[in-house]
Image: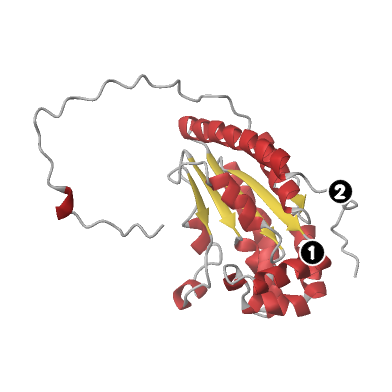
Amino acid sequence: MENSDNLSSKPKKLSRKFYSQELNKLQIELVKLQEWIKIKGLRVIVIFEGRDAAGKGGVIKRITQVLNPRICRVVALGTPTEREKTQWYFQRYAAHLPAAGEMVLLDRSWYNRAGVEKVMGFCTNEEYWDFLRSCPNFERMLIRSGIILIKYWFSVSEEEQEKRFKARNSDPVKRWKLSPIDLKSRELYVEFYKAKDEMFSYTDTKLSPWFMVNADNKRRARLNCIHHMLSMIPYEDLTPDPINLPPRKDSKGYVRPPINEVTYVPEVY
């Protein structure tokens, strides 16, 4: 089946060298953005949604690997507890909203209700429609309170998704990523896209738009998403100047315990 989200023909792969160079440039800018968020007391939420194996985690990893986890943190909530199921739907997410000087990356978000929960039958029809009506209002409240909200949908073709599923299955390090939901989603591919299209019709608003990331090529998707995210938050370079490290103080005769009294990790390698 043709993927309606695939907006362009397949471009050439990026070389590893070019990709690494561009990623390094973008990560330097991410550090500058981090300092700006910290000093200006901004509150930022970035939502990452999309099909299974679309590459959301890879982008999040490249963003966070150079940032301070006290400023930029990832929230990836699991299955709600029995208590959480009785709460207002947005309540468990509201507990993770950023304070001043923080950026939260949501690896999946409240949009679970319009995707997985809807298709897999984990919510009632009434709960589903209540979400679609309430979500734009909830996001409007967040934005009007001063929160910067950015939403990304990672689009991957059916063929590429199947390729990645098979790669995960053949790799013991990645096999844990194949959940029962992933396997079921292969059977319900069309249903998931119907749910996504309906979700967009209600939640792709002028105040809080969705930004589509063509994710068939992982390297391009990572660079394009990070580049776009940087463009969404005006910032200045507030990187501190290098520090002049003072000379180390003399130990003044202190004698440390003998090395043989310490248990070291065996040097196997």
Mark 1 closeness class: few <14, some 14–19, many ≥20 residues within 10 Å: some
Q: Tell me the residue at 86%/57% (across/down).
A: 6
Specify few, some or many for label 2: CA neighbours under 10 Å numbering under 14, 14-19, or 20 or more. few
Residue 72's x, y, as percent? 50, 45
Q: Residue 160 carries which label?
A: 1
Q: Residue at x 51, y 24 (%)?
A: 238
Rendered view: 214 above or below 124: above
Please tell me whether residue 120 is drawn above or below residue 45 in the rendered image: below
- Report the front residue among 223 and 232: 223
Q: Is residue 242 toward the left or the right of residue 123 in the image?
A: left
Q: Can residue 42 be seen in this view?
A: yes
Q: Which comes before the other along the chain, label 2 or label 1?
A: 2
Q: Which mark is residue 125?
A: none
255 on left or right of 219: left
Does the CB distance between marks 2 and 1 fall below 8 Å?
A: no
Q: In this view, does 12 lie to the left or right of 94?
A: right
Q: Is residue 154 above or below residue 250?
A: below
Check residue 11 in the rendering and tell me which mark sits there, or answer none.
2
Q: Is mark 1 on a helix, strand or loop?
A: helix
Q: Could you tell me which residue is drawn at 54 percent across and 34 percent down?
A: 31
Instruction: Name the amino acid type tagged 2.
Output: Pro
**Is there any visible trace of residue 123 in the rendered image?**
no
In the rendered view, would you say 146 is above or below 234? below
Instruction: Name the image quarter holding the C terminus.
Output: bottom left
**Residue 117 on image: x %, y %:** 65, 74
Image coordinates of residue 77 in percent, x first then y, are 52, 64
Q: Is mark 2 on a helix, strand or loop?
A: loop
How far apart are the alpha carbons under marks 2 and 1?
Answer: 14 Å
Q: Which of 237 and 208 is in front in this view?
A: 237
Image quadrant of residue 131?
bottom right
